Image (spheres, rainbow, N blue to C red):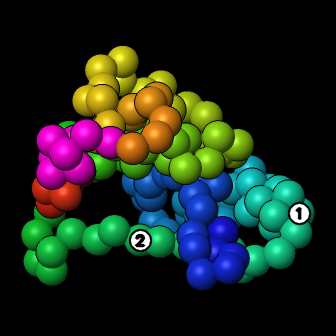
Amino acid sequence: MRSGGGTTPVCVGRATKGFGQECFTHHKLHKCNEALADCGRGSLVILFFEAPSGRRVPARNINLLENFLMQSAPSVNDRLLDIRKTGQERWRIRGVVRSQRRGARSKAARQAAAMPGL
């Protein structure tokens, strides 16, 4: 959902068949309606990740991407509608990844968090 200049994930999934066959099923439309009703304000946004043109992506890589997105989404929205595969890994890097510590981060943590991909 997009509201106030930010975007919050409400559902994560993948299309293994055709787009229309996956996105417009009864239960997926129900999830979209539920997100719109719960939000109150905002716009529904659907993001697509596609393979580089002319390339076939191995199913394993698609699974890895889906797992990553599903594990990352609850850290932004703990009321995610799609709850399968959302179990986060147990490891963490204090002040950088899945940190539970509040307050100022150490200089080393700030430097690590500035690395691309973190």
| Structural crowding at the residue carrying mark 1, measured as other residues with C-alpha within 10 Å and reported as few (<14), some (14–19) or many (≥20) | few
Q: Residue at x 29, y 48 (%)?
A: 65
| Structural crowding at the residue carrying mark 2, measured as other residues with C-alpha within 10 Å and reported as few (<14), some (14–19) or many (≥20) | few
Q: Position of residue 103 (x, y in %)?
A: 46, 40
Q: Which is nearer the N-term, disc 1 or disc 2? A: 1
In the image, residue 39 sits, relative to residue 95, either above or below, namely below
Asked whether 29 falls inside the magenta stretch, the response is no
Report the front residue among 96 and 56: 96
Q: Residue at x 45, y 66 (%)?
A: 18
What numbered label is drawn on residue 48?
Answer: 2
Q: Secondary structure at mark 1?
A: helix
Residue corresponding to mark 1? 37
Report the front residue among 15 and 31: 31
Q: Residue at x 19, y 45 (%)?
A: 107
- Which residues lie in the magenta part? 105-113
Q: CA distance from mark 1 to mark 2?
A: 23 Å
Q: From the viewer's perspective, tell me whether residue 107 is left or right of residue 29.
A: left
User: Of the residues shown, which amino acid type is indicated by label 1?
Assistant: Ala
Q: Position of residue 12 (x, y in %)?
A: 52, 52
Residue lying farthest to the top in this orientation: 90
In the image, residue 100 sits, relative to residue 75, either above or below, namely above
Quadrant containing the N terminus in the rendered view: bottom right
Q: Are marks 1 and 2 in contact (CB under 8 Å)?
A: no
User: Of the residues shown, which amino acid type is indicated by label 2?
Assistant: Phe
Q: Position of residue 68 (x, y in %)?
A: 34, 43
Q: Secondary structure at mark 2?
A: loop
